[in-house]
Image: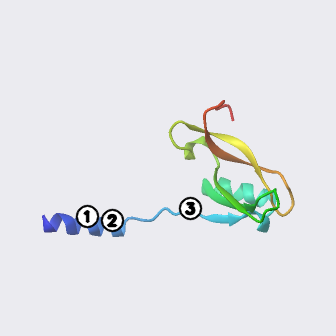
Amino acid sequence: MRMILTAIMVAAVSLPAYAINRYDTRSFTCEQVQSIVKREGAAILRYPSARGTGTILYDRYVATGLQCEYNKHPVYRTVPTRDNASCAVKSCRSGGDPGN
């Protein structure tokens, strides 16, 4: 039993960690943000609330529906970037029309 637990612990430590990168959209152009999401498949994008409250918003954005969880599909949303207040990127959402 001890040997099995040791083997599980060694396997868990040796597996690669698949961390998702985080980006502040205000530091990039719209084209750069879209390129990052396309290249990485998924990324966390952070940006200030449009309400001017100083709140920082964030969400996970994806290149295709393959990065969405079961029963979710990609929909276009917009984030502010250095050069575009409404840069189009995809985010996974439940319900609605999965046509995007």
* Mark 3 residue type: Ile
Q: Quadrant of the N terminus?
A: bottom left
What residue is shown at x 65% (from left), y 48% (from top)?
63
Q: Which residue is drawn at 72% across and 57% down?
A: 35
Distance (Cα) linking label 2 and label 3: 19 Å
Residue 12: which numbered mark, if any? 2
Where does the image place residue 47, in percent across and percent down from the top left? 74, 61
Q: Is mark 1 on a helix, strand or loop?
A: helix
Q: Between residues 24 and 52, which one lies in front from this camera angle?
A: 52
Quadrant of image for the C terminus: top right
Q: How far apart are marks 2 and 1 (CA)?
A: 6 Å
Apparent side of residue 93 relative to residue 14 in the rendered image (left or right): right
Residue 20 is labelled as 3
Q: Which of marks 2 and 3 is nearer the N terminus?
A: 2
SS for tag 3?
A: loop
Measuring from the top left, give residue 99's x and y in whole percent: 67, 31
Secondary structure at badge 2 equals helix
Q: Is residue 89 left or right of residue 50?
A: left
* Tag 1: amino acid: Ile
Q: Mark 1 points at which residue?
A: 8
Measured from the top left, where is residue 32 in percent x and y? 76, 60
Which quadrant would residue 12 be assigned to in this image? Answer: bottom left
Q: Which mark is residue 52?
A: none
- Do residues under tags 2 and 1 come within 8 Å of each other at their CB atoms? yes
- Disc 1 to disc 3, C-alpha distance: 24 Å
Residue beneath the point at 81% across and 56% down: 50
As drawn, 36 above or below 71: below
> Is residue 24 depicted above or below 39 in this figure?
below
| Other-residue count near label 3 (Cα within 10 Å), few / some / many at <14 / 14–19 / ≥20 | few
